[in-house]
Image (cartoon, grey):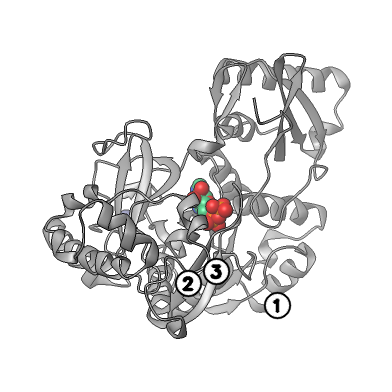
Amino acid sequence: MEFQYWHPDREKIGREELRSLQLDALKKSVAGALRTDFYGKRLAESGISSADDITSLDDVRRIPVTTKNDLRAAFPYGMLAVDKSEVVRLHASSGTTGVPTTIYFSRNDIASWSGLVARSIYSTGCTEADVFQNMITYGLFTGGLGFHYGGEEVGMLVIPSGPGNTTRQFRLMRDFGTTVVHATPSFLLHVESRMRDEGVRRDSLSLKRAFAGAEPYSEDARRRIEELLQIDVFNSYGLSEMNGPGVAFECQCKNGMHLWEDAFLAEIIDPDTMETLPDGETGELVLTTLSREAMPVLRYRTRDMTAFYTEPCPCGRVQRRIRRIKGRSDDMLIINGVNIFPSQIEEVVMGMKEVGNNYLIIVEKDGFLDRLTVKTEVNAETFKDDSRKLNALREKIRHTLQTTITVNPRVELVESNSLPVSEGKAKRVLDSRPRSW
Ligand code: ADP
Ligand code: ZN
């Protein structure tokens, strides 16, 4: 395989060189942060009053962590490190876990962010010859404009289609010979079902690749999309607090996401003890911006659970890879005392070929107990089968789920395309249990 590097001077350097670059950048971030109301106070409390108080990368641990609630409390301008006149754009998080947070960008911030997304896109093998259909929400959400600017920087033809309206998506794909798309994995699965329903022939399209991210998905879901659409799917990870997309991305090897460590200082910690974990162990990812002017964010607790790979990647990049994100620590469901990540359910469901492309997890109170129901779509051919076969399938899913998650769920089979599809992040869990007890 021939690897291509967008920023060889950043991607192909030695580990020591990277570390010294990180230290310089960390000091700049701390200097910027000290100019903000929020960090001015926070850092002073920890005895940091100047960037020179940071003399090694380990000193990052002297800085207190930042949470989503800190960003909310500092709203609107408490974390701004430059004059308002230097801000050229704002974005907001999706608000999956509460009130959205706002992020500000200077002109340089937009340029470095676009560079990181361009680097990510290029590392998958795309070039300026590609036609890129960006099937993700534009607007406050970072995924739309983030990929748009990155795609243009690579020199691809970018079609800002946004999500939704699959009939129009197919028309654009055919009219302009789209070779690569970006979408949430759930929307890609939906696109595939609609392709069959609308009778769109695969050979009428020129698709080769897809970037899929913004929400957790399993390796089985990736394989399913790849097989059904006959494309390569690359995992894309980012969060608005760290610009948006372009934080970590899979290269041509499609085995773990390179975290762009020259732009973000990454730690993986035990979320309970806050201790740093050695490479290979799973914990919460904590990130510090290393190249952001308008709004430096120090030691941000992402809540995302992952681990560093211990092996270097065959592509030779210096930046370490992280594993597929299992979900956020706050996604975890506790059902009758048992901890379950929705991704565990997805792995079972997406691993069965009779199962369709969408599913929904429902958690309710039944007296004092919690009740878990998993609704899964089954593909049209299977749905036509007689009830004995459908019952057997339902029992197979129930049994496999029970052995995997140790909770006995109810399983309901529904027709394909009958469960709600979201244009943004999929809502896979409906939890109607009262929260406050
Ligand atoms: P919100 O935090 O409100 O959802 P963001 O748009 O900033 O808003 O979303 C960032 C979050 O989305 C990440 O912290 C992570 O939980 C999730 N996410 C993004 N990309 C991926 C991915 N490839 N795999 C799993 N989760 C992802
Ligand atoms: Zn690689």
Q: Position of residue 74 (x, y in %)?
A: 47, 60
Q: Is residue 325 left or right of residue 296?
A: right
Q: Is residue 184 visible?
A: yes
| Residue 115 in which image quadrant | bottom left
Residue pointed to by mark 1: 175
Dot 2 or dot 1: first in sequence order is: 2
How many numbered discs sit on the rendered protein? 3
Q: In the rendered view, would you say 139 is above or below 95?
A: below
Q: Position of residue 350 (x, y in %)?
A: 62, 35
Q: Position of residue 84 (x, y in %)?
A: 46, 81
Q: Residue at x 62, y 16 (%)?
A: 336
Residue pointed to by mark 2: 104
Q: In the rendered view, would you say 217 is above or below 85?
A: above
Tag 1 secondary structure: helix
From the Cβ of disc 3, is ligand 1 less than 8 Å away?
no
Residue pointed to by mark 3: 91
Dot 2 or dot 3: first in sequence order is: 3
- Where's the C terminus, which quadrant? top right
Distance from Cα at disc 2 to Cα at disc 1: 36 Å
Tag 3 secondary structure: strand
Q: Position of residue 237 (x, y in %)?
A: 46, 54
